[in-house]
Amino acid sequence: MKILTKEEEQAHYNETLKGGISGGIAGLALGGLGVYGAAARFPAFRSLTVPLRAFLITSSGTFAGKLEFLVVMRILGWNWKEKKRKIG
C-alpha cells in the first residue's frame, strides 16, 4: 500500500469528484432523453405519474455518476501503481 502525500490525495479527490459530476450530468441528460422518447413511443409509459418519471430520470443520473466515479478512481489507482512499480 502506498502512502499518499496531501497533494496527491487532493488531486485524486478532485479528479474523482469531476468524474462523478460529469457522469451524473450525462446520466441525467440520457435519462431525460429516455423518458421523453419512451413517453412519445409507448402509450403505457404516458400513464406513469410525474414523480415516477422524475425518479427514472434521477436514478439514471445517480447510476451514471457512480459508475463514472468508479471508472476515474480505477484509472487513477492504476496510474499510481504504475508509478510505484517504476520507482520501486
Image (cartoon, rainbow, N blue to C red):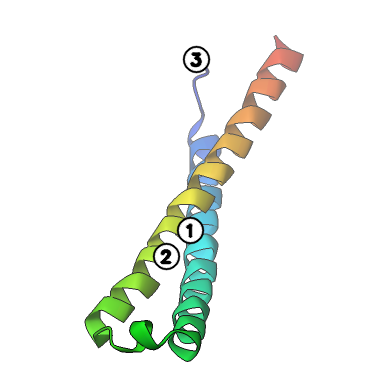
Q: Residue furthest front?
A: 43
The residue under label 3 is which amino acid type?
Met
Q: CA distance from mark 2 to mark 3?
A: 34 Å
Classify mark 2: helix, strand or loop: helix
**What's the residue at 48%, 46% (across, down)?**
13
Classify mark 1: helix, strand or loop: helix
Residue 1 numbered tag: 3
Q: Residue furthest top?
A: 88
Vertical order, 3 against 38 (above or below): above
| Residue 32 percent location from the top left of the image | 46, 80
| Residue 58 percent location from the top left of the image | 36, 71
Badge 1 or badge 3: first in the primary sequence: 3
| Residue 64 percent location from the top left of the image | 48, 58
The residue under label 2 is which amino acid type?
Ser
**What's the residue at 67%, 31% (across, down)?**
79
Circle 2 is placed at which residue position? 60
Circle 1 is placed at which residue position? 64
The residue under label 1 is which amino acid type?
Ala
Left or right, 78 with reference to 33: right
**What's the residue at 35%, 89% (across, down)?**
46
| Residue 27 percent location from the top left of the image | 50, 67
Q: How many marks?
A: 3
Vertical order, 34 against 86 (above or below): below
Sort mark 3 into few (<14), some (14-19) or many (20+) by Cα contacts within 10 Å. few
> From the image, which quarter does the C terminus lie in?
top right
Q: Foreground residue, 76 or 71?
A: 71
Vertical order, 59 against 47 (above or below): above
Label 2–label 1 contact, CB within 8 A: yes
Q: CA distance from mark 2 to mark 1?
A: 6 Å
Q: Give the quarter of the image for residue 35.
A: bottom left
